[in-house]
Image (cartoon, rainbow, N blue to C red):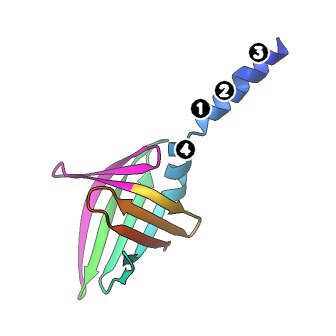
Amino acid sequence: MKKIVLFTILSLLFIACSKETRYNRKIEGDWVLLDIGGEVQVTDIEFQFRRENKTNGKGAIVVTENGSVTKTAFIYSMEEDKIILTFLDGETHTLRIDNLKKDEMNLIDVDLKYDFHFARK
């Protein structure tokens, strides 16, 4: 009986702490784009992620250039080590998490093959 209870508890813990849930919790917040493929950006670009549940959320890309701010909203979902961004016009982009630390994140655009390096704001 004890083995069954222990197995049930361990199974629930494993399911509750999926990779998607951990990633979603870690990406929540504001991230400043430092470079794309090693090229330093002169335009201020920020990604904002707001978690809504274990594997989904809302966000925005905020671009500031010459004092003008453009904000593009998206919803996102986590699938294994990927973030699927869906914009309001229906366009989607898949970003693979290459590296995710407390204050640093590297994402690779699966379609465009760009490597994005971010720092937590």
Residue at x-position 41% and y-position 50%: 82
Give, as a three-letter code, the residue at label 4.
Answer: Lys
User: Which amino acid does the dot numbered 3 rest on?
Assistant: Ile
Question: Can you identify the residue that label 4 sits on?
Answer: 19
Q: Earlier in the sequence, mark 2 or mark 3?
A: 3
Q: Position of residue 109 (x, y in %)?
A: 33, 60
The residue shown at (45%, 42%) is 55
Pointer 1 with pointer 2, Cβ within 8 A: yes
- Residue hosting label 3: 4
Q: Is 71 colored magenta in this rendering?
A: yes
Left or right, residue 44 beside residue 28:
left
**The N terminus - image quarter:** top right
What kind of element bears circle 3?
helix
Say whether disc 3 or disc 4 marks the residue closer to the N-terminus: 3
Q: CA distance from mark 3 to mark 4?
A: 25 Å
For residue 28, say whether it is visible.
Answer: no
Q: Residues within 10 Å of mark 4 (few under 14, many from 20)?
A: some
Q: Residue at x 50, y 44 (%)?
A: 20
Q: Earlier in the sequence, mark 4 or mark 2?
A: 2
Q: Say left or right for 92 vs 46.
A: left
Q: Is residue 3 visible?
A: yes
> In the rendered image of this protein, does residue 34 appear above or below residue 15?
below
Q: Which residues are magenta?
A: 68-95
Which residue has dot 2 on it?
A: 11
